[in-house]
Image (tube, rainbow, N blue to C red):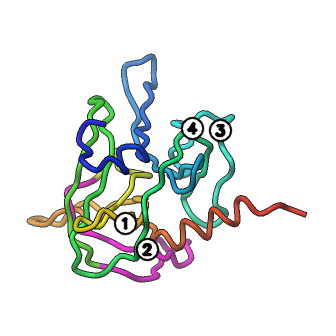
């Protein structure tokens, strides 16, 4: 996988790209394997995932789980304020994987909009943005999977964007809820 030096992540990373509007425009995002045969992306990337593979969506968060033939999943860890991270995403027009380097600035539960409940998230200041939705965020020092990107704020003058990600404890809890048999 172009742009991914870690062999484990290269096996777990799934680029999501699809042409739209008569093949002129494109949509892009990313996904990552979280359990053998199961990947996660954002629910707002549903148009980039084959509908027959969808296992379900989180009821509270922007997460969508789907089946994949890939079986390699990264080890996980909790994000820490001040740690260096690397996020992965896709360009709508360039098939190469994009890397974004950053530093964790926020680790908290916070409402992200006036109608939203609190989200267990972390934020990192970095050079990511469009095309990183659903992509993995890794600890730059040890390669452990910290979270899944779901949003970003445009930067203030002189600053990089603030990128928001769900931590893996939340992602795994939401996967368990999706997989739980309904009575």
Q: Is residue 45 above or below residue 58?
A: above
- First in residue order: circle 3 vs circle 1: 3
The majority secondary structure of the magenta stretch comes to strand
Contact check, label 3 and label 4, Cβ < 8 Å: no
Q: Residue at x 36, y 81 (%)?
A: 107
Q: Which mark is residue 121?
A: 2
Residue at mark 3: 53
- First in residue order: circle 1 vs circle 4: 4
What SS does tag 4 mark?
loop
Per the rendered image, the range of residues in magenta is: 106-128
Name the residue at the right extreme.
183
Residue at mark 4: 69
- First in residue order: circle 3 vs circle 4: 3
User: Label 1, label 2: how many angstroms apart (C-alpha)?
Assistant: 7 Å
Name the residue at the top extreme.
22
Residue at mark 1: 164
Residue 16 falls in image quadrant: top left
- First in residue order: circle 4 vs circle 2: 4
């Amino acid at each position: 996988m172009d742009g991914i030096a870690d062999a484990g992540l290269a096996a777990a990373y799934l680029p999501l790209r699809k042409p739209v509007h008569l093949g002129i425009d494109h949509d892009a995002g990313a996904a990552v394997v979280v359990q053998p045969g199961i990947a996660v992306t954002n629910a707002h990337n549903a148009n980039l995932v084959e509908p027959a593979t969808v296992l379900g969506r989180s009821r509270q968060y922007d997460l969508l789980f789907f089946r994949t033939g890939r079986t390699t999943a990264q080890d996980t860890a909790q994000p820490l304020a001040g740690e260096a991270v690397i996020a992965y995403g896709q360009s709508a027009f360039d098939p190469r994987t994009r890397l974004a380097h950053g530093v964790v600035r926020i680790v908290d539960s916070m409402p992200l909009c006036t109608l939203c409940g609190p989200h267990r998230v972390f934020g990192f200041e970095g050079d990511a943005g469009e095309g990183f939705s659903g992509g993995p965020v890794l600890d730059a020092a040890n390669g452990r999977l910290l979270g899944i990107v779901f949003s970003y704020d445009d930067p203030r003058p002189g600053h990089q964007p603030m990128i928001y990600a769900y931590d893996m404890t939340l992602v795994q809890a939401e996967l368990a809820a999706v997989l739980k048999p309904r009575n």
